[in-house]
Image (cartoon, rainbow, N blue to C red):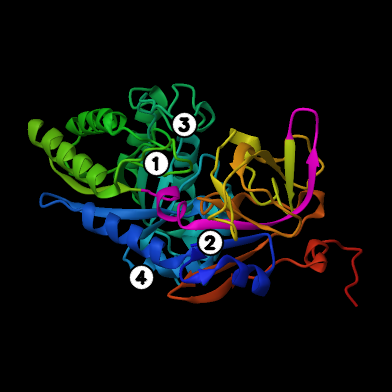
Amino acid sequence: MTELIIGGVTASTLAEKYKTPLYVYDEEKIRQTMLSFKRGFVSKHFDTKVLYASKAFQTIEMLRLVHEYGFGLDVVSGGEIYTALQADFPRDAIYFHGNNKTPEELIYALENELLHVVADNLMEVELLEELSQRYSKKVDVMLRLNVGVEAHTHEYIVTAHIDSKFGMSYESKECQQALQLIKESSYLELEGFHAHIGSQIFDVTAWLAEIDKLTSYLTDFDQPLSLNLGGGFGIRYTQNDQPIPIEEALKKLIEYTEEALDKRKLTIRQLLIEPGRSIVGEAGTTLYTIGFIKKTPHKKYYFVDGGMTDNIRPALYQAAYDCDLAEKLSEEKTEKVTIAGKMCESGDVVIKETYLPKAKSGDLLAVYSTGAYGYSMSSNYNRATRPAVVFVNNGQSRLVVRRQSFSDLLRGEVSYDPS
């Protein structure tokens, strides 16, 4: 094979039809991954539910796919709620997260009959109590806890530090006051507890410690509650990454939770998880066109027609990716190069160092595993337009998100007259 084929369609065909930069998603790969979660996350002792963490990649078409597999949805803003509603996502399967929800966002959620809120702090619970009374709306509340368990992942994306901006310590005065407020409320009901211990996790040990912590809190309650373990399932970005097979990881989490509950003679209503990156990450490929090629005393650069505006992760997290010249897969990789973007920033580097065949201007570059946090974190810096999003499956491609135009960049400007 000399050319990259995604979902039965060649990279050159996609680039010719939709131009570059281009986000390409292998729909069958997404479906197979969701099927693995659906098969693997099952218990005979309690209900289970998979919530898709939509911040990873949220479009109407993606949410329709998520709903097709019976998953719930994790949203973190009014905009994500709006998108979910436009996709006709079941409102009783949407969980509203976030550490600083605005009053307007909470009112929007209540007015649209969202039943589940994951509350981060005491002030939020107080506001939710006030609003639920005002609008006469019943709300199931999960409290986000900081369980003090730290997964061994990149320092910038670990979210369970003791001083993390997310969650409360169960033993804290603030958490206990929140629990008492919920207990006394006529409109709020304690659904359970949520925790998230990190991202890109390759070892289940940290999750097992999280399960120990969460189940220990349940002994303080007479009624069965639900537990949400969050997300963090790792994916393969480069050949150095060795993620745990999803169904194997899920089996261990289910079995360990069953054992932890049995040991304490406890039951729960439901166990939830929130995969996002692990569902869409490896299904996504970004296609670029190589422009200028430049040699410096110590480096050789291949410049591409995108960069940090369509994938901020290398600049933000020093994230690493694998890539290929999409039409030269069989050629020897003799050139040690840096893949850099076109934005006016020295840090706009897509891949710091890799080996590729000798390239010429106009060649296609494919960067793998860009399905999560590429499109969702894209920007218009340097007045760059956001790329199109395409789904491919069984030899067919379909446009999911149109490429932005220059006029789109000015749409919000009062002085702009499109006529």
The residue that disc 3 covers is 159
Q: Which is in the foreground here, disc 4 or disc 1?
A: 1
- Is residue 248 among the parts visible in the rendering? yes
For this rendering, which residue is in front, 114 or 276?
Answer: 276
For this rendering, which residue is in front, 215 or 68?
Answer: 68
Distance between the Cα atoms at labels 4 and 2?
Answer: 35 Å
Query: Label 3 is placed on what type of residue?
Result: Thr
Side of 369 where 318 appears, left or right: right
Which comes sooner in the sequence, label 4 or label 2?
2
The quarter in which the C terminus is drawn is bottom right
The residue that disc 1 covers is 234
The residue that disc 4 covers is 68
User: Can you tell which quarter of the image residue 351 is in?
Assistant: top right
The residue that disc 2 covers is 2
At a point 56% along the width and 68% down the height, the residue shown is 390
Identify the element where label 1 is drawn. Answer: loop
